Amino acid sequence: MATRMPRRRCEPAPFVKWAGGKRALLKELLPLFPSSCSTYYEPFVGAGAVFFAMAAMRVRPWKRAVLADVNEELVRTYVAVRDQPQAVIEHLVSADGSREGYLRERALDPSTLTDPRRAARLISLVTFGFNGLYRVNNEGRFNVPWGKRPRARVCNPDQLLADSSALQGVEIRLADFADTLRTAGADDVVYADPPYVPVNDSSFTAYDKDRFGPAQQRRLADLLRAISGKGARVIATNSDCPEARALYEPFAGLSSVPVTRRISARSASRALGRAHDLVIRAPAA
């Protein structure tokens, strides 16, 4: 289906809330990116705040863009928004934010749905679920309780159409970060925003059935260092804690940025709110 242009000007922006979203860090992150590059890689796309912010620029800095994630529901949602935005919108406008509607939606098996319907399911569950969380159990079943916000805005048609336009020509992959970055090299830019290293026992990072533990953190840091050695510009974010600093200590630039945590599984953590993110860059900007 051909994508029609938005009826009124609407800049690209995340179409779904996602844990670890980077809207609050855009002022610090965007100046670190070069004005042009060959390929832009984002192997942990999440809500895509950095990608959409750069896509909103008059001249996009990349010749080619690759967005990836290991979350199949999220990747299918991106593909549906890119290729069938009108169908996604049609499903979203009838989304039911009541407790009964939410539980019916949550109980559906997404593998039985079309991609636009599957995308609408994900967006509506995150919108109407508790605290905007995406979380699944060990069987991969979405298990977030209802968020008691039946009138939350689940669909902005102009926004979805603007996002679809921004995603045209973008390669979207269901892939591990190592597979995504296999060809990254000179004149490319990589932005890596993985699940964070936990800073304490109350940190909540287990949003998917596949945990991103210490071995994966080390594997990512080693790969990013190798890619930087091949001439790519690498920018990454993580929690500012001794473990993450030790992983990225060989990089040229480390900086600490205060942030407000907007998603947490525990009310006590939400009340605290303040933390620091570690911004990693190589070579230093």
Image: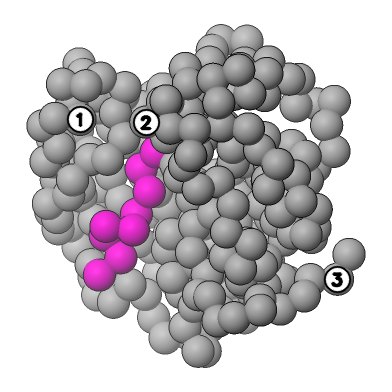
Q: Residue at x 73, y 20 (%)?
A: 108
Q: Residue furthest top?
A: 138
Residue 26 screen position, x and y as percent: 30, 65
Q: Are marks 3 and 2 in contact (CB under 8 Å)?
A: no
What residue sits right under mark 2 in the picture? 131
Query: Up-down: is 138 above or below 185?
Result: above
Q: CA distance from mark 1 to mark 2?
A: 10 Å
Q: What is the three-letter code of the residue carrying label 1?
A: Arg
Q: Earlier in the sequence, mark 3 or mark 2?
A: 3
Query: Residue 229 or 180: which is nearer the viewer?
Result: 180
Residue 45 showing in the rendered view: no
The question of residue 25 being in magenta is answered with yes
Count residues near mark 3 (Cα–Cα under 10 Å), then give few for <14, some for 14-19, many for 20+: few
What residue sits right under mark 1 in the picture? 270
Q: Earlier in the sequence, mark 1 or mark 2?
A: 2
Left or right: 137 as drawn, with respect to 149 = right
Q: The C terminus is located in which quarter?
A: bottom left
Residue 131 screen position, x and y as percent: 37, 31
Say which element carries label 3.
Answer: loop
Q: Residue at x 54, y 61 (%)?
A: 41
What residue sits right under mark 3 in the picture? 2
Look at the image and give the residue range highlighted in magenta.
19-27
